[in-house]
């Protein structure tokens, strides 16, 4: 049984690292070598913020245009939203809502993703846009967070009913919003320069 399955079955509080290690047939120290905190293990492979930051770190020379970067963020968030409808998705959300420490941890992961997006924009954007990298990254995370929060509410409101599967429409919504923000920032930055 994987850590993800154990968290889904027993919840965050009732799933110890020792239990995870026993299920994986390894020593607890081995788990801690790879995941210094139980929260790291909880969010691994289920948090879009970790996936965005890791993807950009692993692929620093890819997604050089705004539209490519928007596509990556939209795809990662859509995949996260689709996983919320899988077995255990509701338990994950109950854990996030029931453990303020997990929500706080997730906000730290959002900041990590924001910093990764900002660094990526600074590395690849036009010189005129680079000073706005932090703002672009903050707007990107804010839009993604809003859509994720809305989808999480839907999952929680459905109780035991099937959750409507609209991961694709959420992707399209996020993609459209991010394109609008991208165009707005680029026009704001380049507008005054173009008139000179």
Image (cartoon, grey):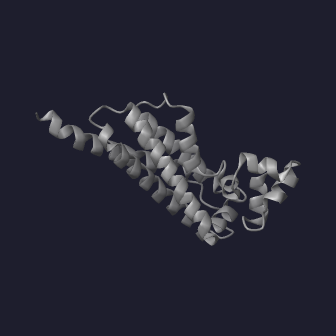
Q: Residue at x 77, y 53 (%)?
A: 3
Of 58 and 71, nearer the camera is 58
Report the number of discs: 0
Q: Is residue 96 above or below residue 137?
A: below
Quick check: 178 left or right of 1?
Answer: left
Q: Position of residue 127 (x, y in %)?
A: 29, 32
Q: Is residue 84 above or below residue 54?
A: below
Q: Residue at x 58, y 44 (%)?
A: 51
Q: Position of residue 149 (x, y in %)?
A: 51, 62
Q: Residue at x 49, y 29 (%)?
A: 62
Q: Position of residue 129 (x, y in %)?
A: 30, 38
Quick check: 89 left or right of 196?
Answer: right
Instruction: Write down the quadrant of residue 162 in the picture.
Output: bottom right
Is residue 69 among the parts visible in the rendering? yes
Q: Quadrant location of the C terminus?
A: top left
Q: Position of residue 138 (x, y in %)?
A: 40, 51
Is residue 155 among the parts visible in the rendering? no
Name the outermost residue toward the top: 61
Quick check: 49 left or right of 136?
Answer: right
Of 119 and 193, nearer the camera is 119
């Amino acid at each position: 049984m994987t850590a993800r399955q154990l968290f889904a079955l027993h919840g965050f509080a009732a799933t110890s690292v020792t239990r995870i290690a026993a299920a994986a047939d390894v020593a607890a120290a081995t788990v801690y070598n790879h995941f210094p905190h139980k929260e790291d293990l909880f969010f691994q492979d289920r948090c879009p913020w970790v996936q965005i930051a890791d993807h950009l770190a692993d692929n620093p020379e890819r997604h050089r245009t705004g539209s490519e970067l928007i596509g990556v963020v939209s795809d990662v968030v859509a995949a996260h939203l689709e996983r919320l409808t899988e077995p255990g998705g509701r338990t994950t959300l109950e854990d996030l809502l029931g453990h303020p420490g997990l929500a706080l941890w997730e906000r730290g992961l959002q900041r990590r993703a924001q910093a990764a997006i900002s660094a990526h924009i600074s590395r690849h954007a036009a010189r005129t846009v680079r000073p706005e990298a932090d703002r672009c990254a903050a707007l990107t995370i804010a839009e993604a967070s809003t859509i994720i929060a809305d989808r999480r509410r839907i999952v929680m409101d459905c109780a035991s009913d099937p959750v409507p599967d609209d991961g694709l429409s959420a992707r399209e919504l996020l993609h459209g919003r991010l394109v609008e923000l991208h165009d707005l920032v680029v026009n704001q930055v380049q507008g005054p320069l173009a008139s000179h």
